[in-house]
Amino acid sequence: MNTGMSSGQGGIFISFEGIDGAGKSTHIEGLAQALRAQGRRVTLTREPGGTPLAEKLRTMVLNDPMDAMTEALLVFAARRDHLQQLIEPALARGEVVLCDRFTDATFAYQGGGRGFDLVVLAQLERWVQTVTPAGAPLLREPDLTLWFDLDPTIAAQRLVSARVPDKFEAQPVEFFRRVAAGYAQRQTAAPQRFARIEANQSRDAVWQDVLATVQSRGWLS
């Protein structure tokens, strides 16, 4: 079940997804500026992370050796705190929340990349993301997910000189092929929520696609 907030000045939740190197982060700030220019209040955040507790868990998840279940549990623990402390209050205030990755990343990285049980992930998703903003429980999901789809080989080339890689960025290309397949599976399951952005274009062309997608939802004029 989705939030159903798609117009007016109600809260809007947009997530940005894609493998490392796809370029999604470049366009989050641009969209924030465009929305603010039209009078919207915008909260920028990320996963894992977004709160002091979740940022501590992020450091562990990205750097410490652990098995896939421990990883998934820590990610969802961070997500619960993120929802309770930041996302839900911002949506209740009528803000636009732009989040660099959300649950689709868990299904893509831990599910697709690590091969962890998707049924268990789905159960964790229900437990952690069930919220009661108006007294009635609903599963909090983004209103829109922008998926920056890029061939893993190209993404790997982009990352070579970017920075010291974390344990995910250091994975072989085959890992990212599985991650990309995980994203594709999530898109198939929720086509009304997902918008696939062809990330192997010029930065301006990608931005125009992002802009057109958000405009088509009536959130930008």
Image: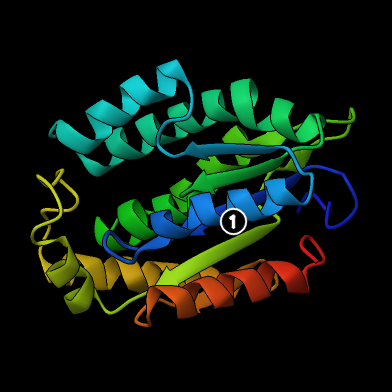
At x 80%, y 30%, the residue is 92
Q: Does residue 170 lie above or below 140 as drawn?
A: below
At x 20%, y 77%, the residue is 154
Question: According to the image, label 1 marks what residue?
Answer: 31
Q: In the picture provided, is 164 more to the left or to the right than 196?
A: left
Mark 1 lies on a secondary structure that is helix
* Three-letter amino acid code at the position of disc 1: Leu
Whether residue 149 can be seen here: yes
At x 28%, y 33%, the residue is 70
x, y percentage for residue 160?
Answer: 9, 62
Q: In the picture provided, is 82 more to the left or to the right than 6?
A: left
Q: Give the farthest residue toward the top.
A: 52
Color style of the picture: rainbow
x, y percentage for residue 55?
Answer: 37, 24
x, y percentage for residue 151?
Answer: 27, 79
Q: Residues within 10 Å of mark 1 (few under 14, many from 20)?
A: some
At x 40%, y 54%, the residue is 25
